[in-house]
Amino acid sequence: MKTITLALAASVAVLVPAVASAQNETAKACFIYVGPIGDFGWSYQHDQGRLEAMEHFGDRLETAYLESVPEGADAERAIERFARSGCDIIFTTSFGYMDATNTVAGRFPDVKFEHATGYKREHPNVSTYNSKFHEGRYIQGVIAGRMSEAGVAGYIASFPIPEVVMGINAFMLGAQSINPDFQLKVVWANTWFDPAREADAATALIDQGADIITQHTDSTAAMQVAAERGIPAFGQASDMIEFGPETQLTSIIDDWGPYYIERIQAVMDGTWEQVDIWDGLAEGHVVMAPYANMPDDVRAEATETEESIRSGAFNPFTGPVNKQDGSVWLAEGEVAEDSVLLGLNFYVEGIDDQLPQ
Amino acid sequence: MFEAILLTVSMAATPLLLAAIGELVVERSGVLNLGVEGMMIMGAVTGFGVALMTGNPFLGAFAAIIVGALFSLLFAFLTLTLVTNQVATGLALTLLGLGLSGMIGESFVGQPGVRLPRLDVPVLSELPIVGRLLFSQDLIFYVSVFLTLGVVWFLFYTKAGLTLRSVGDNHSSAHALGIKVVRIRYMAVLFGGACAGLAGAHLSLVYVPQWVENMTAGRGWIALALVVFASWRPLRVLAGAYLFGAVSIGQLHAQALGIGVPSQLLSALPYLATIIVLVLISRNRRLTMVNTPASLGRPFVPDR
Amino acid sequence: MRIELVKRPQQSALFSALSPFIAFGLTIATGAILFAALGKDPLETLYFYFIDPLTETWSLHELAIKAAPLILIAVGLSVCFLSSNWNIGAEGQFIMGAIAGSILPVVFPDFQFWFVLPLMLLMGIAGGAAYAAIPAILKVRFNTNEILSSLMLVYVAQLFLDWLVRGPWRNPAGFNFPETRSFHEYARLPEIWAESGRAHYGFAFALIAALILWFVLSRTLKGFEIKLIGQSPRAGRFAGFSAGRMVIFAFVISGAMAGLAGISEVSGAIGQLRPSISPGYGFTAIIVAFLGRLNPLGIVAAGLVLALTYLGGEAAQISVGLSDKVVRAFQGSILFFVLACDTLIHYRIRLVRPNTAPAEAANV
């Protein structure tokens, strides 16, 4: 889904000639991370994307990054510093940088800004990008539906923001497509990153009868717990196979490299335009780690599901789907609107948890 | 099920207990070291790194103890020899530890670690409910329990313990009696550092055998809180650590059972509980006064 | 060989002035060695760390923004620490001040008049003060240790804020993301010199607060009372001062300052409430308070220096690729040097050879 915001298309068009004349062989790309690049999760994957871009462009690309930048007043300063230090394009990789990105963008119209996971594009030099991680979660749900003997999965969730809720719902829909009575236990860890707490959450879920674990938190701790308890699990953000060689079924890998290369190339060519990107499997922004530790027929089914999502033949949020209270959300054949998904704040039917409001 | 929960609780409690019991001895000698978090994270990165490089997790745990102690030596030198303010120095130690551990551990990120093996006692570990809890745990768990008992014995049943407490209660009169105040405090701080280092090693070698930055995630602060919560009594530290572990594990189970309470409220419970329990036990002024090291945090310079 | 301290009869004026420079010299030396060992040009790195942030106007504004909450909180804490009240929960009071001050623009967004901002500031001050009063009252009434209770209340405040911005106070037009609506223009703290940068009046509040508290502490009876009770509660009692009332007074003052810092940060620099509004200002301010030797004017200097190390750390990360961990480790070592060198103000340092003074060695 690549949409150019119509209201701003006109101003972009005005800008394009000026930018095109400033065509460059080289560029400087700057990145702001919310966590340490050593988190082996969200920030780590963004930095992998930066490294991929560096490898791709070689000498033509200069990069710089700031890690562990707190959201709030510090973010605005960090972004402004980049804008002043000659960066041609700045990637701000956390939702909390949204307002800071837009404020600074207003002051530096010649610099391009790319904000991950946000929705505000107040100036023509601001784009937003995100990935459809829920596509991968649906596939995970299908696998879980096949692999779970008890029909109970444990889900370690971080914070009840739409993206996480979307993931839980997609997982459940995938599982229900195999086993209509599938049960999902959700634990809100209230953190993106606290390995010990995530391990505790995984243990609690297993002790409560879950025999398959998936997570929307960033560390590899849950994978290690699952490995120790001898039950399968799904990875998150990066390929965690090394932490559970006989445990990981697959992992949703955030691969930002292709997007970063594409956007930096656009800056070099002078063809950069404002976009609102929400891509998934089809564009290679979401990659499934190799399906492992499962029988061949399950692997075949997972691959088939992945293919049908990639080709666009199937959308995970296709009716009939009921809300948790039993009321109809999507009628037969109806596909959820992106705008609804991006503000999702309810569960689908069958989830045994109360969504924190 | 109950057995499994007990095991998880003991897992969550062990690093807290270790760090807290070390800090208890430090505070009993009259020194307030707020750098527990920093020493813990140094222990975590050392334990992980040494275990990874040598393939021997026991060596890793041992190295963590040494590095924790060495790191606390820095604090001891500043606060005891140079008489700097203990609160500020402790905070600076935490800052330094978080930065330094990140530097050291940069190459360890993303590598699966080596787990400290469980020590199975045959037959006994088959006992119902408590079997696995008591007889099939890792070495550090046993160390934490025996260390707690050892500290009880040391503080209240030995002359050296009495000396240490007297230093904490009134360093001037202890000094007047010819007790080497600074030397005793050095040793107490080193002991605290060693314990915090081992607590860190428990995180990176047992709890979650991996290295990630900031993986202590505030547990050093909770350990500090536990010491005060326990009004400086070792057995109460043990109880407090397990209570804290039980509450934080319990709230995860409550969630998994689908009990709909705001998760923030559940997460806040251990802290609120600590305050309430603290109010209840400290209402008895005489009782707390007996155990509080009166010289806590006050600088000492022998004058002659 | 052994190091021994000999207390000076009075504070050394020479070393009071000199110790920051000695500390700075040691810092430079350590930094140079550390950076060289990491393969960076030491001079260049040090330049970016300490000089570069001071060479541009916008950067000076940023310095003021970063220093403002640190100074405000730290001057409040100095009252606490001087009177021996160990409030380490300023982070929580900062958050509660921000929450209380945000009630008007978040809950009553249509209420837009010029007096909204003054009301917000007052409510922020009240919120921080009230939250700080909890550990104070617990200490006076129940003898509860204030270090612990104030620290525990930090976590409670953080979770309360988290719950508010994810739940009842969530921006209705914000796609369910965890943040409140943006404050309207009457709720924003204005910038001081809008044309040159975005420093807001929070920095002015910090300077004014530092001046007032400096005057109170050094020139008034109240200041004498604070210090006397801090040094010797017994002497304070003889002088007719109430230690209990001092506990409440000190906590409320420092809570009020932290609350003002909180609402200034939110209405000045951020413009809305978010799950995390402070990168640990309340804790860093404790270090600032001691670096400034618990003197409000010293705290202003210390706050600026510490803010500089944050900005310089970023500049060094970007310009010479110094990693964030090295920056933090270096920051930690700066604090150690400053703390260690301040020893010279109160003590003379003597090196003692064990064989010449065995009797003295036995005393330590």
Image (cartoon, coloured by chain):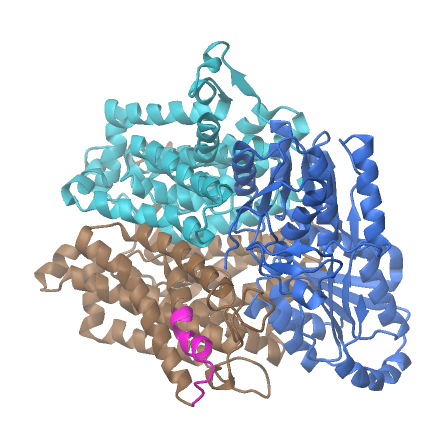
Q: Position of residue C192 (x, y in %)?
A: 50, 85
How many numbered discs, if any? 0
Q: Which image quadrant for residue A272? A: bottom right
Q: Which residues are the magenta region? A: C97-113
Q: Position of residue C56 (x, y in %)?
A: 63, 78
Q: Is residue C281 above or below residue A140?
A: below
Q: Which hue belongs to chain A?
A: blue
Question: Quadrant location of the C terminus of chain B?
Answer: top left
Residue found at the far top of this picture? B123
- Taking the image as shown, residue A102 lies to the left or right of residue A185, namely right
Q: Is residue A66 visible?
A: yes
Q: Position of residue B300 (x, y in %)?
A: 29, 45
Q: Nearer the viewer, residue C171 or C143?
A: C171
- Taking the image as shown, residue C304 lies to the left or right of residue C232, namely right
| Residue C101 within the magenta-colored segment of the rendering | yes
Q: Which hue belongs to chain C?
A: brown
Q: Residue at x 57, y 23 (%)?
A: B58
Q: Is residue B82 visible?
A: no
- Taking the image as shown, residue A95 lies to the left or right of residue C128, namely right
Q: Is residue B54 above or below residue C286?
A: above
